[in-house]
Image: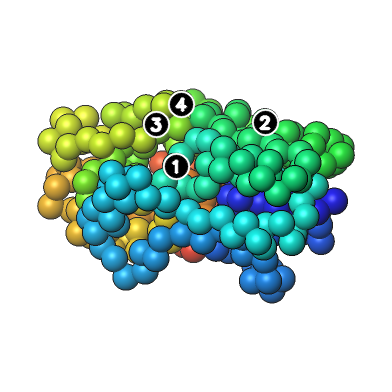
C-alpha cells in the first residue's frame, strides 16, 4: 500500500495501526508521531500563521474565505509521484484541512484510482469508528478492532474511577478572539472525564459566542483549548482571557493540538487529562498536558 494522509489525525491513526512504513505523503501539519521521513513528501501546504495572535489568524482566515482563496494547497505533482493506493481525507472543516472534494478531483485529473476514505467524525464514538474505517480500507481490521477495544477499556477505567462523583459544570473555550464554544466531540470528552459541558454544541460545529454568554453559563471550570495550539500557547491565551472569564471559575489550559482538537487516538489521553482536572484525587501526572491558570 501507498497511503497519503491529508489530515494530522489520519496520520496518527496510520501510525497507531502499524502502517507508518506505507505512509508516503502527509500534510505540513502532520507532526505526530515524529517521523524523519515525513519531510520528503509533504503534499499539502497551508497558511503561515506563525507568530500571529488569535484575532489576526481569525481575520486572515475570514479574508481568505471571503475572497474564495484556498486555505490549503495540494501539490498535485508530488501527489501524482506518490501514486497513492489509499487517500485519507475529510469534509468536516474547511479551515482545518484540505476538503475531500479537492483530493478526489486531483485523483480524477491524474488518472489515479486510489481508495478515498473520508473521515468526518462529529462525536467521540464517530472518532473511534474512523479508526475502524481506516482499518477496513487498509486490510487491518484486526488491528483497528484491537486498538478501539483498548481505547474503550481506558474510557471505562476513567468512568469506573469517577462513578458517583459530582460532575462540575465545564466550559471549553475553543478559540479566544473572538471566543468560540466547543462542538463536535469535545463535549463528549468532557462527559467522559466526569464533567457536565455547558454552553456547548454536542456533535455540532464550534461556533462564535460572547464573553457575556460564557459568564452567564456560570461554569465551575473553564478549559482553554484553542484549536491549533499546544500547552504553552494555550496557557498564554488563558491568561489573556482571564478578565473576561467568570470570576469564580477555575481556569485551566490544555494541549489542544495534542489531546483535544485532532480526532484520533490521543483524544483518550485528553479524557484522562481532563479527568485529572475535574477529579484531581484520581492521581496520575498530566503536567505535560494541562496547566492551572487560576
Which residue in the structure is indicated by mark 4? Answer: 203
Labels 2 and 1: the sequence-earlier one? 1
- Where disc 4 sits, the SS reads loop
Residue nearer the viewer, 8 or 171: 8
Residue at 69% over, 37% down: 117
- Nearer to us: label 4 or label 1: 1
The residues bearing labels 2 and 4 have C-alpha atoms spaced at a distance of 14 Å
The residues bearing labels 4 and 1 have C-alpha atoms spaced at a distance of 17 Å
Which residue in the structure is indicated by mark 1? Answer: 94
Which residue in the structure is indicated by mark 2? Answer: 129
Q: Are marks 2 and 4 in contact (CB under 8 Å)?
A: no
The image position of residue 254, as x and y in percent, is 41, 54
- Where disc 3 sits, the SS reads loop
Q: Residues within 10 Å of mark 4 (few under 14, many from 20)?
A: some
Which residue in the structure is indicated by mark 3? Answer: 205
Place residue 119 in its image quadrant. Answer: top right
- Nearer to us: label 3 or label 1: 1
Labels 2 and 4: the sequence-earlier one? 2
Residue nearer the viewer, 285 or 175: 175
Q: Residues within 10 Å of mark 1 (few under 14, many from 20)?
A: some
Could one spot residue 82 in this view of the protein? yes
The image position of residue 257, as x and y in percent, is 48, 54
Quarter of the figure that contains the C terminus: bottom left
- Where disc 2 sits, the SS reads helix
Labels 3 and 2: the sequence-earlier one? 2
Question: In the rendered view, does 135 fall on the left or right side of 182?
Answer: right
Labels 4 and 1: the sequence-earlier one? 1
Residue at 58% over, 50% down: 7
Residue at 46% over, 47% down: 96
Amino acid at each position: 500500500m501507498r497511503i497519503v494522509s491529508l489530515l494530522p489525525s489520519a496520520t496518527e491513526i496510520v501510525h497507531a495501526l502499524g502502517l507508518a512504513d506505507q505512509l508516503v505523503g502527509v500534510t505540513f501539519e502532520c507532526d505526530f508521531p515524529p517521523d524523519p521521513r515525513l519531510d520528503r513528501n509533504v503534499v499539502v501546504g497551508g497558511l503561515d500563521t506563525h507568530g500571529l495572535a488569535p484575532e489576526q489568524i481569525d481575520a486572515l482566515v475570514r479574508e481568505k474565505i471571503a475572497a474564495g482563496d484556498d486555505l490549503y494547497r495540494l501539490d498535485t505533482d508530488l501527489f501524482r509521484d506518490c501514486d497513492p493506493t489509499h487517500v485519507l481525507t475529510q469534509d468536516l472543516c474547511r479551515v482545518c484541512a484540505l476538503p475531500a472534494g479537492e483530493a478526489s478531483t486531483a485523483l480524477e485529473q491524474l488518472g489515479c484510482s486510489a481508495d478515498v476514505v473520508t473521515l468526518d467524525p462529529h462525536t467521540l464514538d464517530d472518532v473511534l469508528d474512523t479508526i475502524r474505517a481506516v482499518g477496513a480500507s487498509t486490510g487491518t481490521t484486526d488491528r483497528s478492532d484491537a486498538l478501539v477495544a483498548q481505547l474503550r477499556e481506558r474510557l471505562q477505567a476513567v468512568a469506573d474511577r469517577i462513578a458517583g462523583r459530582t460532575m462540575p459544570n465545564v466550559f471549553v473555550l475553543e478559540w479566544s478572539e473572538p471566543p468560540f464554544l466547543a462542538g463536535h466531540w469535545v463535549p463528549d470528552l468532557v462527559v467522559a472525564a466526569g464533567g457536565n459541558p455547558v454552553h456547548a454544541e454536542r456533535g455540532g460545529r464550534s461556533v462564535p459566542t460572547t464573553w457575556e454568554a460564557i459568564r452567564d453559563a456560570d461554569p465551575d471550570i473553564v478549559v482553554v483549548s484553542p484549536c491549533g495550539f499546544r500547552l504553552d500557547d494555550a496557557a498564554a491565551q488563558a491568561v489573556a482571557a482571564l478578565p473576561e472569564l467568570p470570576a469564580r471559575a477555575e481556569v485551566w489550559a490544555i494541549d489542544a493540538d495534542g489531546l483535544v482538537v485532532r480526532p484520533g487516538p490521543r483524544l483518550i489521553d485528553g479524557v484522562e487529562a481532563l479527568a485529572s482536572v475535574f477529579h484531581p484525587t484520581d492521581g496520575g501526572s498530566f503536567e505535560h498536558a494541562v496547566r492551572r491558570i487560576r
